[in-house]
Amino acid sequence: MQTIKIRRVCKEDLERIYEIEKSSFSIPWSIESIEQELNNILAESLVAEIDNLVVRLYRSLVYHG
């Protein structure tokens, strides 16, 4: 049985997120752009893991009102 886990992004996820980006889009973001966006304090970044492999990135803007 596969184990699915949702957690906050960590620095070690950057390379895997970039791999997913390259395989998903014909014009992917650069690794630098992804890293900059992951450090955006106005957004929440989560990843989904299946059996300890990151398979998806989730992003949402956080309203600080």
Image (cartoon, helix red, strand yellow):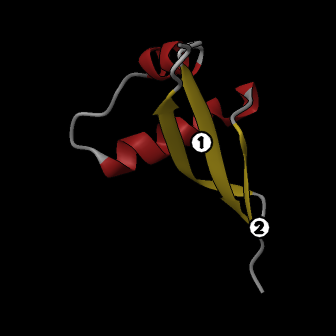
- Tell me which corner region of the image, top left, top right, bottom left or bottom right, holds residue 27: top left
Instruction: Relative to 17, say whether 14 is above or below.
Output: above
Q: Position of residue 18 (x, y in %)?
A: 49, 35
**In the image, residue 7 above or below residue 43:** below
Expressed as whole percent of the image width and height from the top left, the position of residue 35 reads 54, 18
Mark 1 in CB contact with mark 2 (< 8 angstroms): no
Mark 1 and mark 2: Cα distance apart in space: 14 Å
Instruction: Find numbered disc 2 in the image and state the secondary structure of the residue it sits on.
Output: loop
The residue lying furthest to the bottom in this view is 1
Say which amino acid is labelled 1: Arg
Residue at (41%, 41%) from the top-left corner? 21
Q: Earlier in the sequence, mark 1 or mark 2?
A: 1
Crowdedness of circle 2 by 10 Å Cα count: few (<14), some, many (20+)?
Answer: few
Viewer-side residue, 33 vs 60: 60
Disc tally is 2
Mark 1 residue crowding within 10 angstroms, few (<14) / some (14–19) / many (20+): some
In the shown orientation, is residue 20 left or right of residue 50?
left
Image mark for residue 16: 1
Local SS, label 1: helix
Which residue does the image show at 74% across and 30% down from the upper left? 10
Residue highlighted by disc 2 = 51
Look at 48% across and 34% down and name the residue there.
60
Which is nearer the eye, 9 or 54? 9
Q: Amino acid at mark 2?
A: Asp
How far across and down, in percent of the image, does residue 24 sit?
Answer: 33, 50
Does residue 51 lie above or below 2 as drawn?
Answer: above
Q: Residue furthest left?
A: 26
Q: Give x and y (percent) for residue 33.
A: 42, 16
Q: Residue placed farthest to the front in the image?
A: 65
Query: What is the quadrant of the N terminus in the image?
Result: bottom right
Q: Is residue 45 left or right of residue 49?
A: left
